[in-house]
Image (spheres, helix red, strand yellow):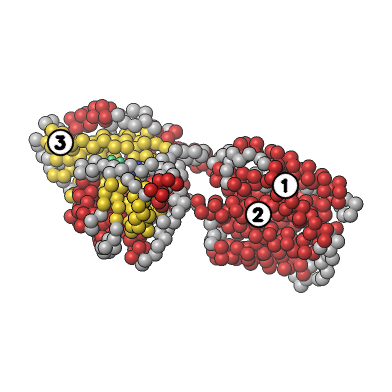
Amino acid sequence: MADRYLMSVKQSIDYLFIGLGASNCLLILELEKKALLSQKKIIIIEPHQKNKKDKTYCFWATDEDAHNIIEPQCIDKSWSTVILNGKKQDLDPLSYYHVSSLTLYQKTLFVIDKHDATILQNKISDTEPLKRLIIDNSEYIAKYIFDCRPPKTAPTKKHEYYINQSFVGWQIETKEELFDSHSFTMMDFNIPQNGATQFVYVLPFNSKKALVEVTRFGKDVMQREEGEALLKNYISQLGDGYQVTDIEIGCIPMTNASFLDENDSTIRNMGARAGHVKPSTGYAFRSMAMDAQKIAEQIAEDQKEIPASINQKRNNRFAFYDRLLLHILFRTPKWGKPIFKRLFEAIKATEILAFLDEETKLKDEVKIFYALQWKPFIKAVIYDAFSIDRIKNSILVPLFITLIFLVFDGLGIGHINDVILLAGLVFIGIPHGAVDHLIEHNRFNEPICISFIIRYLAQAALMVLLWYLSPALALFFFVGYSVYHFAQADFSEWGVKVTSFWLWGTLLFTGLLLGHPLELSGVLNELTLPGLAVSQGILLKSVWVEIAVIALCTSLVLGITKHVWGMCIVSISLLLALQLSLIQAFGIYFIFQHSRLGWRHIQKHFNVSSRVLWRKSALFSLGAYGLFFLLWFFLNDNWDSYLGTFFIFLSAISFPHVIRMKKFYGYFKREK
Ligand SMILES: Cc1cc2nc3c(=O)[nH]c(=O)nc-3n(C[C@H](O)[C@H](O)[C@H](O)COP(=O)(O)OP(=O)(O)OC[C@H]3O[C@@H](n4cnc5c(N)ncnc54)[C@H](O)[C@@H]3O)c2cc1C
């Protein structure tokens, strides 16, 4: 690889387009509209000639929106009425538009030609470094890179589904006038379902010419012969005497599986690769056009960094609806036809289209779901809500555990809480810090090496030494890096900008520690430090508890104003946990919030299951228990207490861990 770089000639360019797909075409046209291509060096890498019609793009919009999406000359047909369930409906103020892919390509190629852009007929593999792309002894270094190669995605998690939207279409010309050229037929289910969800679209271009397309939502891709047999049958019901003038065969992935992340802010995924294909419908054109507009605006403002594609991590209620429908179509495809038929019967076409555009309000969605068959949706919701994955990844976990602890305490069986904490410590708390050897070099199969162990133990020993020399300094240092480390994991999960990073950590620790002044004083005394002077508060028993309550209420308000619901939940849990002991309150946060998140982040980064990660952590987990007993054994003469020793142990093993996790969140953040 190094040789290749030495031998190549460097070329600095402005725009590098990988693939001349619909999304990059739309972007090129948008950049042209804003005069952002003049005097620019442009390279396009596309293996195909793009001189054939291979797709038709349909979308719905108002007239004004349609002309913002694409120039009116590119639209070869539009329809103002739709036939649904055999009934005609006016689409006003919307129309359904049709764009031929060939028109889009030709228009784009014209622009490319005008700006003397170079098209290289190559294929770029997924492992090729796009930032310094080498082709035929030239190394291209681009200011902006837009990549629309087809995505590689496959469901890896429980709630990820993948079905194919496959279709076979015939453009036909009939002898007689069979079609109403103002109306198109959407999802006509009057065809055999063949164990999937199948329907037909009819897009008439005039009274004798139409594209008739049979579509399947299903696990199996519809084969050409199957589709043609269905088409023959369907068209024979419309009338006799026709001629097939064109064929369209295609397949669109319908999936909610995650897409490749961009790991560099100058490389932007586009189109299907950026998740613009709506999982439940397969429509993408309008969304890609909007994206192109946003990118062009950004470049016009001379912003070097294009924001990451928005659709990658859809996590809103529409993603939930998509997931439910995909679940139903994947598991019980027989429900597809009755659900869509009922939808078209009960809800106006324009309302359905607004829903598919994700522009409805919650009350509209309630109306839609109320009209549909409840049974398959309730089943899908239950399946969705009650999976172990969803429960353990929920932001409510710390609150849930706190409530359980309070109930057990109230029932006088608080010792169960300690058992739960001990189990949590063994299964998550200690193991989440016992894979630091993988994090050190960011390699999952990194063998354990002696020099790492020595370095790690030396850093831990430094902390013990500091406790020995100056407990006050050690405590200050320990609290400082813990504040940083805990806030780092939380913020990484919540996706908050680092503005109030330290503030959150400080509020959290203030609430956690000062909320239990007597126990904190006890621990401080065991560490040979003075305890807190217990002074009477105005509202509560102790002024320290009042400070803790103020700190936690502040973080709650901060969470509400910034819409960081995770912060709100932790703040509420800690407020409730003021009723529990310090060790339990701290244990809940440390195990069920901090360690749980850390474990999940590491799992996600290395893309491994918990079981695999536990195996990797086993040796160092055992080492940690051994270290604890050693410390206990040696320190018990000086600090004759379990709690003090535990505190020192925690600070000693967490110091080298915090160093590694700082490194980890550096690369974890970049890849997010
Ligand atoms: C047949 C069909 C019909 C569709 N109809 C509609 C519709 O009516 N309405 C709608 O909203 N959506 C529709 N879609 C969905 C979506 O709009 C299209 O898939 C759209 O083309 C996606 O655009 P894209 O830029 O992501 O990828 P594409 O348009 O698929 O382009 C990908 C490009 O990358 C190139 N390429 C591939 N491999 C490499 C490589 N290794 N190196 C460099 N280049 C490479 C390809 O040659 C191609 O030019 C349809 C999809 C299909 C398949």
Quarter containing ligand 1? top left
- Residue at image location 14% in from the left, 40% down from the top: 209
State which quadrant residue 608 falls in.
top right
Q: Is residue 212 visible?
A: yes
* Above or below 210: residue 196: above
Outermost residue, bottom side: 538
Describe the element under mark 2 as helix, strand or loop.
helix
Front residue of 642/283: it is 642
Q: Are marks 3 and 2 in contact (CB under 8 Å)?
A: no
Describe the element under mark 1 as helix, strand or loop.
helix
Query: Mark 3 is on which residue type?
Result: Thr
Mark 3 and ligand 1: say if the CB distance to the nearest ligand atom is below 8 Å: no
Mark 1 = which residue?
454
Residue 395, x across and y down, in percent: 59, 51
Mark 2 = which residue?
659
- Residue at image location 81% in from the left, 71% down from the top: 536
Q: Are marks 2 and 1 in contact (CB under 8 Å)?
A: no
* First in residue order: circle 2 vs circle 1: 1
Give the foreground label among 1 and 3: 1
Query: Mark 2 is on which residue type?
Result: Ile
Q: Which disc number belongs to residue 245? A: 3
Per the model, the C-alpha gap separating discs 2 and 1 is 15 Å
Describe the element under mark 3 as helix, strand or loop.
strand
Query: Mark 1 is on which residue type?
Result: Ile
